[in-house]
Structures are given as structure tokens and as C-alpha cells.
Amino acid sequence: MVESRALAALAAFGRWRPRALRLARRASLMARVRSLPQPEFLAHLVLARARRFARQPHLSLRIARALQDVVPAPWRNWLGWEWALAGGEQLERSEQLEASESASSIAMLKQVLGEQPVEPGVLAMLGDQRERLPLPFANDVAGLCGCLQSAASELSAALKDWRGEHVV
């Protein structure tokens, strides 16, 4: 039941974000009550993502900070992803992230989101990796690349509106 609620919250991100936050909060609460580690990690990471999408990155970072000492290696890439996109400085034990495809995407995300200048070709490489990432992460990368590229053909209506207001 916990996993189905968490997955329903993930599915709701695309269409109805307030519902996604409610479902994620419910899944997280159910997971805490039942004390099942793996479903609990899933539910809490989905809640961190929901908080970030609800423009509450400080709450997303709080959840990620609480998870960083307890999640095993298979969950650390997702944790690093949410941490980077919520604006976290440096995730402790990040050396465990080096082994996978999403780890290199996280490193590129940190460069793009950081204060240092983006090296040429990083956005293109990030766009190429988008095809190999799981769907929620691929959507994050598509949105980020769309915000930063000068000409984008496949943007959502909300992103086009945002670009119209923020891109000079």
C-alpha cells in the first residue's frame, strides 16, 4: 500500500501537483508507521521530490539530510539527485555516487546549477544522458535544459511562460 501511494504520487507530478504532494505526504506517513525500510525510503524520497516541486526546497533538503545517514547505496543516486536540484551544497558520502549513469548526470547538474561557468558541451551531454535516465529524472533534465538553451522546440506551456518572463 505504501509503495502504491508513493508511485501514484510520482505519476501525479505531470498533471496535478497538489494531489502529488498529498499522496506523497500520506505515503510517507504510512511508511513511518509501518517501519518497513525499503518502502519508507521510496516514500520519503518521493516526498522530498514533491516538496521541491511545491516550491519548498528547504523542506526537501531537510528530508534528504535526514535520509543521508540511513539510505543504502541503491538509494543514494536518487537522494543525490533531489539534493542537487533542491540546492544542497555538498551531499556527504557522495563518493558512493560515482559508479552509475545518474552520478555523472548529478555532477553535470551541480555544474549547471552552481555559480561557476558551465563548460561548453555540458548541456548537450546532459541532454544525451536524458535518454538513459529513468523517466522522472529525464523530465527534470529536459526542463533544466529547456530553461538554459536559447532555442528549444519541445517545451511545456508552463516552461514557455516562464521563459517568456525570465529570458531576456
Image (spheres, rainbow, N blue to C red):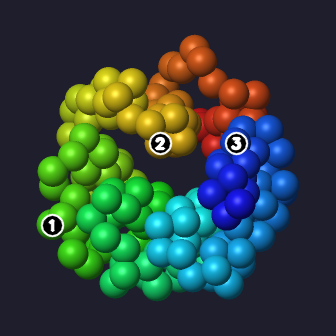
Q: Is 67 placed above or below 109 here?
A: below
What residue is pinned by disc 3? 11
Q: Is 99 placed above or below 37 here?
A: above
To which quarter of the image does residue 114 belong?
A: bottom left
Residue in front for this viewpoint, 14 or 26: 26
Look at the numbered discs 2 and 3 and tell me whether their residues touch, using CB distance below 8 Å: no
Label 1 crowd bin: few (<14), some (14–19), many (20+), radius 10 Å: few
Where is residue 62? Give x, y as percent. Answer: 53, 82
Residue in front for this viewpoint, 28 or 38: 38
The quarter of the picture where the C terminus appears is: top right
Residue depth check, mark 2 versus mark 3: number of the one nearer the observer: 3
To which quarter of the image does residue 74 belong?
A: bottom left
Q: Is 162 placed above or below 29 here?
A: above
The numbered mark, 1 or 3, whose residue comes first in the sequence reads 3
The numbered mark, 2 or 1, whose residue comes first in the sequence reads 1
Asked if residue 62 shows in the view, the reply is: yes
Q: Is 109 placed above or below 28 here?
A: above
In this rendering, would 76 be left or right of 2? Answer: left
What amino acid type should be assigned to the residue bearing mark 2? Answer: Phe
What residue is pinned by disc 1? 95
The secondary structure type at the circle numbered 2 is helix
Where is residue 126? Give x, y as percent. Answer: 32, 34
The secondary structure type at the circle numbered 3 is helix
What amino acid type should be assigned to the residue bearing mark 1? Answer: Glu
Q: Which mark is residue 137?
A: 2
